Image (tube, rainbow, N blue to C red):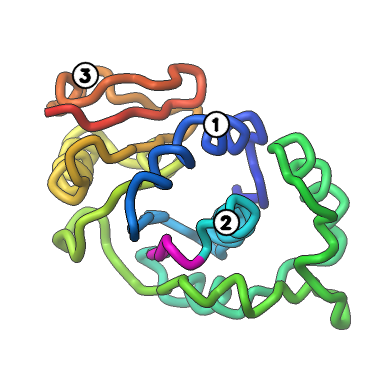
Amino acid sequence: VTAMFRDPTFFRAFRELVVPLLRTYPFSRLWVAGCSTGEEVYSFAILLTEEGLADRVRIYATDINQSVVDIARRGVFPLDKMQEYTQNYIRGGGTRSFSEYYVARYDGALFSPSLQRNVVFSQHNLVTDSSFSEFNAILCRNVLIYFDKSLQARVHELFYNSLVMFGILALGSRESLRFSPYEDCYEQINGPEKIYRKVR
């Protein structure tokens, strides 16, 4: 299940708590792990555009399934979802008219190619593949709920090793760092929205 600006309160918290941290870097990398068909990727591309960070943050969007990565790369979403996504966008702190970001084509909403300028789409398996860069923020929301404890531990190790010191890890609303091997390596900066910062 995915949607643009899903859990709008998370996006509001990201603007308030994480964006100021990203501003402290001349350039940063953000990993959307388990990006599915790309709704979250475009949501973050829009958010970073509005915050004036689009040219200073590269988004890496990965998923195990190459066919959904290909869908994400196309940037076309169902037109009948735009009303819902617009409401999410507004509640998530959007500062413009959401319709500025897409044009209606046939039964789809084609999102502006400019949003992809600093996005890298790639296939990646969270369980078997290793880290491929150093990240200032990793967003993996509602993916780990499908993994058992041992696989979750492996993914947490990957994320820990991939994050810079004081980097941000964001999990889904039904996920937590509690009882993970890396629980003590992070501080919670927003409990309800599951936003953590690596501190050791």
Figure quadrant of the C terminus: top left
Residue linked to disc 2: 52
Q: Earlier in the sequence, mark 1 or mark 2?
A: 1
**Residue 88 placed where, x, y %?**
75, 41
**Residue 64 placed where, x, y %?**
35, 65
At label 2, which amino acid type do we have?
Gly
Within-10-Å neighbours for mark 2: few <14, some 14–19, many 20+: few
Picture layout, residue 47 above or below residue 173: below
Residue at 19 percent of width and 46 percent of height: 164
Nearer the observer, disc 2 or disc 3?
2
Q: Distance between the residues labelled 2 and 3?
A: 37 Å
Within-10-Å neighbours for mark 1: few <14, some 14–19, many 20+: few
Nearer the observer, disc 1 or disc 2?
2
Asked whether residue 59 is drawn in magenta, I would say yes
Element under label 2? loop
Picture layout, residue 169 above or below residue 183: below
Residue linked to disc 1: 16
Picture layout, residue 111 above or below residue 54: below
Residue linked to disc 3: 179
At label 3, which amino acid type do we have?
Phe
Q: What stretch is highlighted in magenta?
A: 55-60
Name the chief secondary structure element in magenta. strand
**Residue 5 placed where, x, y %?**
66, 46
**Residue 169 placed where, x, y %?**
33, 37
**184 relative position to 14: left or right:** left
